Image (cartoon, grey):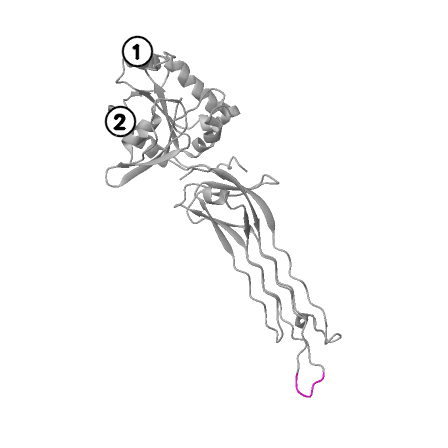
Amino acid sequence: MHFVDETEIQVKGGDGGKGCVSLRREKFVPKGGPDGGDGGDGGDVIIEADENLGTLLDLASKAHHHAQDGKPGAGRKRGGADGSDIVIKVPVGTIVRDRDTGVVLKDMIEHGQSIVAARGGRGGRGNATFATSVNQTPMEAEPGRRGEERHLKLELKLIADVGVIGKPNAGKSTLLSRISAAHPKIASYPFTTLEPQLGIVEVGQYRRFTVADLPGLIEGAHKGKGLGDEFLRHVERTRIVVHMVDAAPVDRSDPVESYHAIREELRLYSPLLAEKPEIVVANKMDLHGAEHGLRRLREALDVEVLPISAITGKGLKALIISIVKTLDGLDEEPQEEKPHPEL
């Protein structure tokens, strides 16, 4: 399934049905009273979050969504039927934004959350409504009101407990394949991961967490270079970051410089993103020269650096324990009310 995380759609509520002009016909009454019914209301366009979806692909291929119009009123004060609503399902993590104003209408962060994106128009009143003591046989009725119409921009930000970041070829996809049941594409060239991959890590019988393997970042990613700008938004949703550094790069680049380059991209893209809890991992410890890279990282960084080999599995148990402890620590912290950065 192709991953699509941005698309635009047009939504329109149904138009209200028109009111009816009708006069009651009774035996021996040449001109009965008004009995025109009201028109039905137009249907709404509703957007709803669905945890079973993981992409906006279906919506990318269907740009227009129109709820059903209300039916017109009829004689004998019969009201027209209301138009049916339509429900558009989107993945959890979708931001619904008015394309023209840029205003965020809803941040769909939980399964079942919904928003009325375009309301249907009210049905018009029939002539029975207009009868008064002065005008007992009105011959007027209202047309139905038009439904709301909007152009929406939908932006999906994956929601995961852990976001795995690092330069291309740092070993992120291999790690995900070893600790979860996910099967990301793995190869020895840059940008193997062209779209985010999600995996679920089972820890014992009752504990699990989700991991997002995100495309490799390069310098200038916050400006749109490489693939990083497209996927930095997904890191914002993760609770913690696992920063993978290649401890034995084939190009003999300095692991410390690689670490700081990625940290700078996070900071330039979003200072809030750069403040997320981070676990630093030195990968490829099975290769010659990795011990030197690990030593450089530990000397230069004022944080713990976990040595692992995603290929052989060395150190992965210690990494999972560290991830669980970090997540548990966040769960114990009192949650402060903070304004959403999109608003």
Magenta region includes residue 29: yes
Residue range in magenta is 26-30
Viewer-proximal residue among 262 and 252: 252
Indicate the quadrant containing the C terminus: top left, top right, bottom left or bottom right: top right
- Residue 342 pos. (x, y %): 53, 36
Disc 2 is placed on an element classified as helix
Viewer-proximal residue among 9 and 207: 9
- Residue 317 pos. (x, y %): 25, 28
The numbered mark at residue 22 is: none
Disc 1 is placed on an element classified as helix
Residue type at mark 2 is Leu
Indicate the quadrant containing the N terminus: top left, top right, bottom left or bottom right: top left
Q: CA distance from mark 2 to mark 1?
A: 20 Å
- Residue 241 pos. (x, y %): 38, 28
Residue tagged 1? 292
For image coordinates 71% across by 69% down, the residue present is 140
Label 1 crowd (10 A; few <14 / some 14-19 / many >=20): some
Residue type at mark 1 is His
Residue tagged 2? 316
Q: Is residue 163 above or below residue 121?
A: above
Residue 78: name its quadrant: bottom right
Judge left or right: residue 190 versus residue 45.
Answer: left
CB-based contact (under 8 Å), mark 2 and mark 1: no
Instruction: In the displayed orientation, state which residue is furthest to the bottom.
Output: 28
Label 2 crowd (10 A; few <14 / some 14-19 / many >=20): some
Majority secondary structure of magenta residues: loop
Disc with the residue nearer the chain's start (2 vs 1): 1
Q: Is residue 12 above or below residue 223?
A: below
Magenta region includes residue 275: no
- Residue 339 pos. (x, y %): 51, 37
